Image (cartoon, helix red, strand yellow):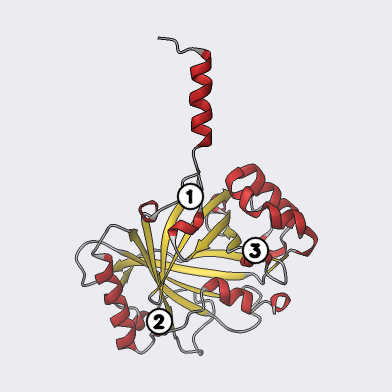
Amino acid sequence: MRLPACYTLFLASVFFALPAQALDKQDFDQVEYAFDINEPKTFEMAPKSLAGKRADYYDFVDFKSKRKEKLVTYLDTPDRQFSKKSLIVRVREDLKKPGKSKITVKLRAPSPEQFGDLKNYKKAEIDIENGQKKYSVSYDIKMDPTRIDVRKVDVKAVAEQIRKGSSDAWALVEPVFSQYADQIRQTIVMRALSWEGLVTEISGKVEAEYAVWSPYYRSPKTFISEISFKGSASDESLGRVAQRIKDALKEKGIDSDSTLSKTKTTFGLSPEFN
């Protein structure tokens, strides 16, 4: 039965008058645990393999994967306008699989309700780093590394790629790109190496990733390391996996209570942001 035109208009007005629905805890269906590692400073900055002492430290993970290698940089203004809005803009080139290179726009908040109405995101995730919990929503935009060079980022090209690739991500970052376009800079470029394998002596199959980041141009001569794993937020067994990794790191004497993430460390190493 066809509805009268006036009734159809009434329904439309009611629908568009409804308040936007903020995200709630159930929308965050993924969780990532991360543990900073206090490795000896004498270790190689950019190892070609996990052989030797590193292998001894991480014998609680059965590493099978080949080394993955990415180049990573972040964008912001010197006074951190993106960060002030709880935003992260990351540009990442996958050297092994260039087709997986991407720009990521991530929004963070202490609680789910603070995100407001967001749509079409890649993932809504609970980030637990060294026991501290945060919530994040991220958008991934494909990037052609032959058009956007991570080593020398064209800020306008990144902005245009976000605008074309995701109108929702663009709505988050557009105010900063528009108002501070001439001030936006990139951090130093970090070489991100990683290996994956199954965590041993636990029930089920949980894959952990070991990552070591160091400056691509080897200056300053430093590196940061991390063990992480992901899973469903509803999986109660992940807490036992986290405890297994925490205990193993403590037993090896390389556990750390640092609250410096890879992102914070990269900005900390970048002169233009200090």
Determine crowd level at label 3: few under 14, some 14-19, many 20+ residues with C-alpha closer than 10 A. many
Q: Which residue is mark 2?
A: 54
Q: Is residue 105 left or right of residue 156?
A: left
Q: Which residue is mark 3?
A: 82
**Whole-Å distance between the Cαs marked 3 and 2?**
36 Å
Callout in the foreground (3, 1) = 3
Which element type, helix, strand or loop, lies under badge 2? helix
**For the point 51% across and 74% down, which residue is it?**
261
Residue 122: mark: 1
Callout 3–callout 1 Cβ contact below 8 Å: no
Q: Amino acid at mark 3?
A: Phe
Q: Amino acid at mark 2?
A: Arg
**Whole-Å distance between the Cαs marked 3 and 1?**
19 Å
Of label 2 and label 1, which has the lower sequence position?
A: 2
Asked where in the image residue 167 lies, by quadrant, the reply is: top right
Residue 137 screen position, x and y as percent: 49, 56
* Quarter of the figure that contains the C terminus: bottom right
* Quarter of the figure that contains the N terminus: top left
Q: Amino acid at mark 1?
A: Lys
Residue 135 screen position, x and y as percent: 45, 62
Callout 2–callout 1 Cβ contact below 8 Å: no
| Residue that sits furthest to the top in the current view | 1
Residue 223 screen position, x and y as percent: 54, 80
Q: Nearer the viewer, residue 115 or 145?
A: 115
Q: Is residue 166 in view from this perspective?
A: no
Asked where in the image residue 163 lies, by quadrant, the reply is: top right
Residue 113: mark: none
On screen, 196 above or below 232?
A: below
